[in-house]
């Protein structure tokens, strides 16, 4: 809504299961809003040439906010702690 109000029409917001995401198009930028232990290489298949990925990577108590240019090339911007992305297909079972 805020993007439309500000006449920004070149942004696509996707709310998907990260672990099962299969994009129908490639993106210039991808922002992952939950943390990951490591960034899977498959994410780079979602990008256009020269695309970038913003992700928070690592484990508590220290995680890094990074912008990746490739699988092995990234810039680290700050340390943080962000909730981990969880697989939606994992069922928790109740045990006594």
Image (cartoon, rainbow, N blue to C red):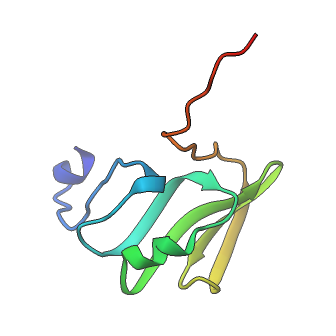
Q: Quadrant of the C terminus?
A: top right
- In this view, the residue farthest toward the top is 96
Vertical placement of residue 19 versus 55, above or below = above
Residue in front for this viewpoint, 26 or 31: 26
Please name the residue shown 57% across and 43% down the image: 86
Vertical placement of residue 5 versus 37, above or below = above
Q: Quadrant of the N terminus?
A: top left
- In this view, the residue farthest toward the bottom is 49
User: Percent x, y for residue 52?
Assistant: 46, 78
Vertical placement of residue 88 versus 96, above or below = below
Q: In this view, does 27 lie to the left or right of 86?
A: left
Please name the residue shown 62% across and 53% down the image: 35
Marks counted in the figure total 0
Please name the residue shown 57% across and 63% down the image: 55
Q: In which quarter of the image is residue 29?
A: bottom left
Please name the residue shown 55% across and 85% down the image: 70
Residue in front for this viewpoint, 74 or 59: 59
User: Percent x, y for residue 27?
Assistant: 32, 74
User: Percent x, y for residue 31?
Assistant: 46, 62
Residue in front for this viewpoint, 17 or 11: 17
């Amino acid at each position: 809504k805020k993007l439309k109000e500000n006449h920004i029409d070149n942004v696509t917001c996707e709310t998907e299961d990260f672990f099962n995401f299969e994009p129908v198009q490639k993106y210039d930028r991808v922002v992952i809003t939950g943390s990951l232990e490591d960034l899977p290489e498959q994410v780079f298949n979602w990008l256009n040439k020269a695309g970038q990925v913003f992700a928070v990577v690592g484990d508590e108590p220290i995680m890094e906010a990074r912008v990746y240019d490739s699988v092995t090339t990234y810039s680290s911007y700050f340390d943080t702690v962000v909730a981990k992305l969880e697989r939606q297909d994992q069922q928790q079972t109740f045990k006594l």
